[in-house]
Image: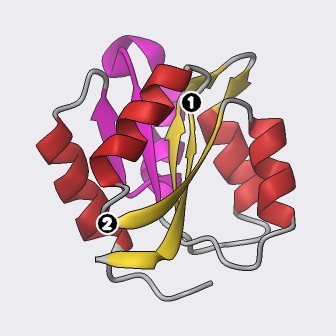
Amino acid sequence: MNKDKTIVVIDDHDYVNESIEIAISHLFSIRSFTSVQSAYKYLVNTPSVHGFIVDYHIGPNSGLEFIRDSVRPLYPKIPAILISAFYDRDIPNVDQAEINQQFVANLTKPFDVQKLQQVAENVFSEQPVH
């Protein structure tokens, strides 16, 4: 258990954020946001974030753009997991190489809770504090 590690979850649907929080809050401290703007405000004012779980489509924004343009300048090596309702249909082929570069794992919604727990624990447990 790594409750001292904070994972930021960003999905524009509250019920997805709540589901993720229920699934992994026994493992990590979770901060959920429905927009990249509110997540970014939190990020720049918080010295200790250990990972991200980000939806590909966040309202008018892309989770890929948020990780690449907002997170990487502050936390170049922080692990991130990408989630998407329709991974094969949502992700353009041109984004796939960049997604592989920016994210350590991806999950398709609806995700299996045990798989989410396993992936999150594997990805975030061994990471150093940032």
Residue drawn at x 24%, y 46% as measured from the top left: 116
Q: Identify the residue shown where x is 46% and y is 22%.
A: 15
Tell me which corner region of the image, top left, top right, bottom left or bottom right, holds residue 58. Answer: top right
Q: Residue 98 versus residue 5: which sits nearer the camera?
A: 5
- Check residue 84 for magenta coloring: yes
Describe residue 83's horizontal placement relative to residue 41 as left or right. left
Residue 92 makes an appearance in the image: no
Q: For the view shown, which residue lies furthest in the bottom direction?
A: 128
Chain part drawn in magenta: 80-108
Circle 1 or circle 2, nearest the eye = 2
Q: Which residue is mark 2?
A: 27
Q: Which residue is mark 1?
A: 11
Distance of label 1 from label 2 (alpha carbons): 19 Å
Q: Quick check: 18 left or right of 45? A: left
Question: Is 64 situated left or right of 71 in this image?
Answer: left
Q: Secondary structure at mark 2?
A: loop
- Disc 2 marks a residue whose amino acid type is Leu
